[in-house]
Image (cartoon, rainbow, N blue to C red):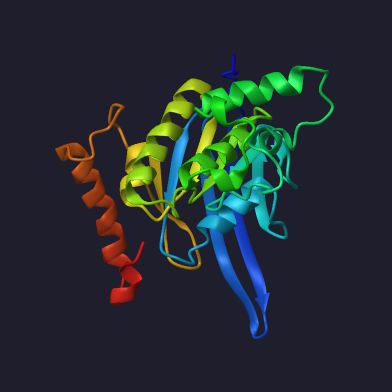
Amino acid sequence: MVGGSVGDKLVIEGLHKSYPVRTGEVTALEDINLTIGNGEFIAIVGASGCGKSTLLRIIAGLENGYDGTVRLGDRRIAGPGLDRGMVFQEHRLLPWLTVEQNVAFGLNGLVPGEKERLVREHLDLVGLTGFARVHPHQLSGGMAQRVAIARALVNQPGLLLLDEPFGALDALTKIQMQQEILRIWEVERTTMVLVTHDIDEAIYLGDRVVIMSSRPGTVKRIVPVNLPRPRDRTSYEFVEIRREIYAEFFAEAERPFAYAI
C-alpha cells in the first residue's frame, strides 16, 4: 500500500530574488515570508509575471542566487532533492519509454522487486493500472498528467509542487484532474503547493490561498478556505471567497489587461 507519510514544515523567510538585465536588474520576488505546515494544501495565485513559478522553482531547488532563507524542516534548500517532487504544466514524459518506465525513471538503488512494487502502487494510485505498457502518445492529456503525478510521487516526497499542472487541459478534464489530485492528497497527505491562474481551482483545492502582488512579487494576502470537502463551487460560501479574492486583484489593477489572473 502506498505510504501516507507526512513531510516537514516549509519555511520561507525574507526571500528576495532578482535577475540581471542589460539595464541593471529586475526584482522578481521581494520579502516573501510564508510557512506551510505538514500535510497542508496551499494554492498560490497572482498576475502573470508576479513570480509565482519562480517561487516554486526556488522551493524545488531549480533556482538559486537568492537572498533569504528557504527551509524544509531543518534543511536549507540548496538544490533539487528526492524530498520534493514537481509536476509541470506539460507532462514532460519521455516518449520512447512506456508509462511504467517513465514512472520508474528516477528510482535507483532499490532491492529487486521494490521498484516494481512502487511503480505498480503509484499507477494504481492515479488509476492507470491497465496502462503500464503503453507509450505517452497513446494517452489523453489528462492521463499523461496522471503519469507525471505518479512519477513525482513515486519517490515518496514530503512535498509536491504543482506548477499550473492542469492549465493545458480542456474544462471537463481539468475538473476531473482537480478531483483526482484532491483524492491523491487525501490518501497520501503529502504537503502540496499549487501555482495556478484559476481562482476557482485555488479555492476548490487549497486550505489557504496565497495572493501575490504584481512584480515585484510579494505576499499581498493569505485567504483561509474554511470549507468542508468536497466543496460546492456554487455555494454561497464558495462564491463569497471568490469575490473576496477577485476584489484584491481589482483593487490593485490600474489597466484592463492587468485584470488577467
Give the x, y percent position of residue 234. Answer: 18, 40
The answer to whether residue 12 is above or below residue 252 is: above
**Is residue 257 found left or right of 139 in the rendered image?**
left
Give the x, y percent position of residue 157. Answer: 64, 31
Q: Is residue 24 something one can see in this rendering?
A: yes
Between 62 and 25, the one nearer to me in the picture: 62
Give the x, y percent position of residue 126. Answer: 51, 29
Give the image quarter of residue 84: top right
In the displayed orientation, state which residue is furthest to the top: 1
Quadrant assignment for the N terminus: top right
Q: Is residue 223 something one can see in this rendering?
A: no
Quadrant assignment for the C terminus: bottom left
In the displayed orientation, state which residue is furthest to the bottom: 23
Give the x, y percent position of residue 14. Answer: 59, 53
**Is residue 200 found left or right of 137 in the rendered image?**
left
Residue beneath the point at 71% across and 42% down = 97
**Is residue 29 found left or right of 226 in the rendered image?**
right
Between 172 and 253, the one nearer to me in the picture: 172
The answer to whether residue 177 is above or below residue 65 is: above
